[in-house]
Amino acid sequence: MEVLTTAEMERADRLTIAAGTPGFALMLSAGQAAAEGNDPLTGRRLRYGPSGYELAGTPSELGPAGDAIGHTGAGGGSHGAWPGLRTGFSFLPAELRSQDADRRAGDVLAALHRVVAA
């Protein structure tokens, strides 16, 4: 396994952007809704961008940032990014809990948002 330095990663990212890689174009529009509606299993309103990730503005716990993009998981996990704050996050709890009674991700993401938005 090869591990790149920060400078090497930056160079690789710049080359990818300069090449016009489709994935980069997709990520530029990742925060725009491509599909939305009610989940047939839970009835919750969901919004997805063209990348397939969930978007802010739904009951999914992606934190308080209005431009949040990511995905939530069974048991209370939440993983994503706040592009406007140049922040990525991943919260994976060890104890699984029911979604309707679990505030852990919301509390952690609210605290993180207070720090990075300050």
Image (tube, rainbow, N blue to C red):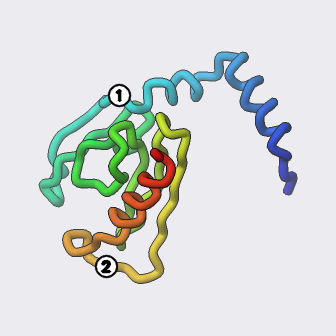
The residue closer to the viewer here, 97 or 42, is 97
Q: Residues within 10 Å of mark 1 (few under 14, many from 20)?
A: some
Residue depicted at 47% across the width and 34% down the height = 84
Question: Which residue in the rendered view is the most extreme toward the bottom?
Answer: 95
The residue closer to the viewer here, 50 or 76, is 76
The residue closer to the viewer here, 40 or 84, is 84
Q: Which residue is the site of mark 1?
A: 32
Residue depicted at 81% across the width and 30% down the height = 11
Position of residue 28 relative to residue 90, above or below, is above
- Which three-letter amino acid code belongs to the residue tagged 1? Gln
Residue depicted at 33% across the width and 49% down the height = 64
Residue depicted at 77% across the width and 34% down the height = 10
State the CA–CA distance, disc 2 to disc 1.
30 Å
- Which three-letter amino acid code belongs to the residue tagged 2? Arg
Q: Residues within 10 Å of mark 2 (few under 14, many from 20)?
A: some
In-image side of 65 versus 20 (left or right): left
Which quarter shows the N terminus?
Answer: bottom right
The quarter holding residue 29 reads top left
Q: Which residue is the site of mark 2?
A: 97
In-image side of 60 versus 108 (left or right): left
Identify the disc placed on residue 5: none
Residue 82 is situated, as x and y percent measured from the top left of the image, at 46, 42
Position of residue 84 relative to residue 17, above or below, is below
